[in-house]
């Protein structure tokens, strides 16, 4: 189902600009379309890496392409747009997305587009989802492609849209127009501690991720953490049948009833580097259930079943820890498979959010080769799971049937997480 | 299950986030290891603490976990018996109020604690494995005596930092028998305390080079503006810095990524740069750079003969308060207690103890190059990599 270069070459309707460009002769031109550009916003993390370079493979790497145009939707206090534009005169700031993509001409003038619709002040849905305008931005990008009669690869940060139907539309549009389209979280591509890959074609019996953050925020990252692993199971991805959320007292009741396995939950906790010490005077002590009930104000789980029967659970355990920890039971293995998907987080732990580096590097590779680094179907599925999770939470834990998430796909043969 | 291993803890202080608390607590409440909460088959039976400042936890721990705080080291080792009554000893002489010497080293009484343990071993005709936290002593001469005593009495001795055993980003090891042309280590913090960690990190890599460790011929420290003359490979320096997740300056101001080696950046950020040039007896050259103000992590790069790109990595120091990297160290200590074999040679820490002192000697003697014939320390690295990887 993934888009291949050979399919692209077959496309007679919309010639992909980046393949015609002649790589040796000219460096690809990239446009960035972002909601905000201020310190530690995703727009800053991603666009800066193209402008300033970043540590990669043991050197300060400068992408072999130029970020030539920028559209910024909001300019709140702390906006860095002007400062960056002044220091990087090769990058122009445009007042509209269309102008950013055409660079003031009448046709598409860039070879790749970064769509970063995270952070900024946007209205919320009744369910509490921030309506980041990713779909709106995407539509404007596609309008330029249509008007120009050519396309360019698109990198979409995080999930596709807060709204499932829109996400599906984005996916369908990219497929119909045959341009490379990648999206998602940095969790599947960041460091792992330990540095291990989900065993190829292992038969997964159950998987979970214990992480932190809020509904319609880090839940997506937790879901991508799981999906980036379990899609490698025997048979590949088969889609998801239903999802049910558990929150507050229902979470603890489900935990006690074994809706998800206690031993997997505990194995995930053992991968954390940030377990909140449950007892004063101790710095690293394993929390009891009572400890967790005291430290976790708002526990949330999304528990869901794949079409092949695999059960997964994404658990938000803010207050008890602040990292992403995965655990799975695999058939024929006594030991639980577990690892931390490590985010060097600038919340005091680091100053750089280096986990954006592998994400940006994958985007760069896509801009250079026209090949997507991982199946977009992963993020289509996790977008749908996030929406279903939010929906279930909003409906007090109702089980949501997800026939629309019958999304089957195969993983990339090689690992894509950060190891070098 | 076998009888638990009885351990005596000899510490300078036991308060929240002191090394004694990090390390000894893990034997009391367990620690994360290989995806489990591991509960060692070890029982702390006695404790000696040299100082009881505000926040002292020793009595509280003794009461909760059923051990005794003794007024002196010999009593802690004998637990009220006429003879040595423990199976292993943790000496944790880090933190607490101790004077500084003229080199700026804190005079932690590790050697003095160790000597008292050895006296009991001698008197009672039995010795047990000892873990000594961090460097052996501020004085190489004393450190040497400690290693000599362990050889004379034949008890396993393990020492050092957690950096050699923590996670690495990326998860790489120095290839066994590599021909190292040059190495650069970047660290931060105080020269005595943190310089040691940086040197241990560097040493655990370099000791794997062809021929194993052969010792250090000379050491030279420079400080201030002179550091920027750059007497080391810029490519290696850049490679080590590219592994940092904690650049300061502009990154702190607006989040941007930075090429710290771009002209003018580091001199603006680092008020008091310090470089130690280390020349090994086999000709290998290494530079330790302490760059307070520019970075807050520990990174390494080395040029290997025949390799196109340097090998480089970050030694990951996981966040407080958990500091799970110390669990990696405790796992090595426990391994020695169980097997009665040190998983890696104490000679590494003997050498790094001597290097810290020599680097500071060079500084105090007007930044002169110092010949170090006493650091003629030869050893072979452990067969297996000791970094955290499971």
Image: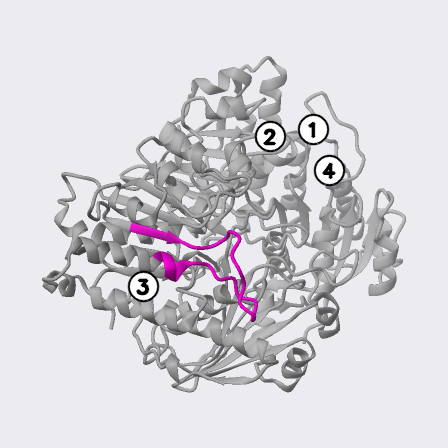
Q: Nearer the viewer, residue B384 or A51?
A: A51
Q: Which residue position is annotated with label 2?
A: B356
- Please tell me which of labels 4 and 2 falls first in the chain: 4
Label 4 – label 2 distance at C-alpha: 16 Å
**Magenta: main secondary structure:** loop
Share a chain, discs 1 and 3?
no
Which element carries disc 1, helix, strand or loop? loop
Share a chain, discs 2 and 1?
yes
Q: Are marks 2 and 1 in contact (CB under 8 Å)?
A: yes
Q: Chain of mark 3?
A: A
- Please tell me which of labels 2 and 1 falls first in the chain: 1
Q: Chain of mark 1?
A: B
Q: Please state which of the two labelled residues, at mark 1 or mark 3, is closer to the viewer.
A: 3
Q: Residue at x 42, y 64 (%)?
A: A159
Local crowd size for mark 3, using a 10 Å CA cut-off: few (<14), some (14–19), many (≥20) = many
Q: Which residue position is annotated with label 3?
A: A374
Q: Which residue position is annotated with label 4?
A: B111
Local crowd size for mark 2, using a 10 Å CA cut-off: few (<14), some (14–19), many (≥20) = many
Q: Which residue position is annotated with label 1?
A: B105
Q: Can the viewer see residue B182?
A: no
Q: Please state which of the two labelled residues, at mark 3 or mark 4, is closer to the viewer.
A: 3
Q: Nearer the viewer, residue B257 or A242?
A: A242
* Position above or below: A328 against B369: below
Q: Residue at x 43, y 83 (%)?
A: A402
Q: Please state which of the two labelled residues, at mark 4 or mark 2, is closer to the viewer.
A: 2
Instruction: Return the x and y of residue A124 as percentages of the image width and height.
Output: 54, 63
Residue A119 is inside the magenta segment: yes
């Amino acid at each position: 189902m993934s888009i291949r270069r050979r399919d692209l070459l077959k496309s007679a309707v919309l010639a992909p600009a980046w393949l015609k460009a002649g790589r040796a002769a000219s460096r690809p031109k990239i446009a960035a379309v972002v909601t905000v550009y201020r310190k530690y916003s995703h727009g800053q993390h991603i666009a800066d890496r193209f402008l300033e370079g970043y540590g990669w493979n043991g050197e300060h790497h400068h992408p072999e392409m130029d970020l030539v145009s920028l559209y910024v939707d909001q300019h709140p206090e702390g906006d860095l747009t002007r400062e960056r534009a002044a220091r990087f005169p090769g990058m122009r700031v445009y007042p509209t997305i269309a102008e950013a993509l055409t660079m003031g001409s009448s046709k598409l003038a860039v070879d790749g587009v970064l769509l970063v619709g995270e952070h900024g002040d946007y209205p919320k849905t009744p369910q509490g989802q921030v309506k980041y305008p990713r779909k709106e931005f995407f539509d404007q990008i596609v309008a330029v492609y249509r008007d120009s009669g050519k396309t360019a690869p698109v990198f979409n940060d995080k999930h596709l849209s807060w709204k499932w139907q829109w996400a599906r539309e984005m996916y369908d549009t990219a497929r119909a127009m045959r341009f490379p389209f990648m999206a998602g979280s940095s969790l599947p591509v960041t460091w792992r501690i330990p540095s291990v890959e989900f065993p190829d074609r292992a038969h997964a019996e159950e998987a979970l991720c214990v992480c932190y953050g809020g509904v319609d925020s880090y839940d997506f990252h937790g879901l991508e953490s799981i999906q980036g692993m379990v899609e490698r199971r025997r048979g590949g991805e088969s889609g998801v049948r239903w999802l049910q959320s558990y929150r507050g007292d229902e979470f603890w009741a489900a935990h006690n009833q074994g809706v998800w396995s206690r031993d997997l939950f505990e194995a995930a906790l053992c991968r954390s580097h940030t377990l909140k010490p449950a007892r004063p005077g101790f710095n690293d002590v394993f929390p009891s259930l009572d400890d967790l009930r005291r430290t976790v104000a708002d526990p949330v789980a999304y528990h869901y079943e794949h079409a092949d029967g695999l059960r997964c659970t994404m658990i938000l355990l803010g207050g008890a820890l602040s990292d992403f920890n995965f655990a799975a039971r695999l058939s024929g293995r006594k030991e639980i498979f577990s690892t931390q998907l490590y985010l060097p987080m600038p919340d005091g732990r680091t100053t750089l959010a280096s986990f954006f580096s592998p994400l940006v590097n994958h985007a760069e590779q896509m801009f250079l080769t026209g090949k997507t680094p991982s199946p977009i179907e992963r993020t289509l599925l996790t977008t749908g799971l996030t929406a279903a999770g939010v929906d279930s939470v909003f409906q007090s834990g109702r089980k949501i049937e997800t026939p629309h998430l019958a999304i089957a796909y195969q993983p990339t043969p090689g690992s894509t997480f950060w190891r070098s | 299950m076998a009888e638990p291993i009885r351990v005596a803890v000899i510490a300078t202080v036991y308060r929240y986030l002191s090394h004694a608390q990090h390390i000894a607590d893990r034997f009391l409440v367990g620690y994360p290891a290989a995806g489990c909460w591991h509960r060692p088959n070890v029982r702390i039976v006695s404790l000696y603490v040299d100082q009881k400042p505000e926040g002292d936890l020793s009595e509280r721990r003794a009461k909760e976990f059923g051990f005794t705080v003794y007024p002196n080291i010999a009593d802690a080792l004998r637990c009220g018996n006429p003879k040595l009554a423990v199976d292993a000893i943790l000496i944790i002489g880090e933190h607490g109020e101790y004077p500084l010497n003229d080199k700026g080293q804190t005079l932690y009484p590790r050697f003095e604690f160790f000597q008292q343990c050895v006296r009991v071993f001698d008197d009672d005709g039995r010795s047990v494995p000892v873990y000594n936290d961090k460097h052996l002593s501020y004085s190489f001469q004393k450190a040497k005596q400690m290693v000599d005593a362990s050889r004379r009495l034949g008890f396993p001795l393990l020492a050092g930092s957690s950096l050699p055993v923590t996670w690495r980003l990326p998860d790489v090891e120095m290839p066994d028998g590599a021909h190292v042309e040059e190495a650069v280590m970047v660290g931060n913090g105080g020269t005595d305390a943190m310089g040691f960690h940086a040197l241990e990190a560097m040493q655990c890599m370099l000791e794997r080079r062809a021929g194993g460790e052969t010792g250090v011929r000379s050491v030279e420290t420079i400080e201030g503006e002179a550091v920027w003359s750059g007497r080391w490979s810029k490519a290696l320096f850049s490679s080590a810095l590219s592994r940092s997740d904690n650049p300061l300056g502009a990154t702190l101001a607006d989040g941007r990524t930075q090429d710290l080696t771009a002209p003018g950046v580091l001199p603006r950020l680092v008020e008091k740069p310090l470089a130690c040039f280390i020349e090994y007896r086999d000709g290998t050259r290494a530079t330790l750079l302490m760059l307070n103000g520019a970075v807050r992590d520990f990174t390494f790069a080395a040029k290997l003969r025949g390799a196109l790109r340097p090998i480089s990595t970050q030694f990951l120091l996981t966040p407080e308060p958990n500091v799970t990297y110390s669990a990696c160290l405790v796992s090595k200590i426990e391994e020695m207690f169980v097997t009665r074999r040190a998983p890696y040679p104490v000679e590494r820490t003997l050498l790094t103890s001597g290097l810290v002192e020599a680097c500071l000697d060079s500084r105090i003697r007007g930044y002169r190059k110092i010949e170090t014939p006493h650091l003629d320390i030869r050893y072979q690295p452990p067969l297996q990599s000791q970094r955290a990887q499971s």
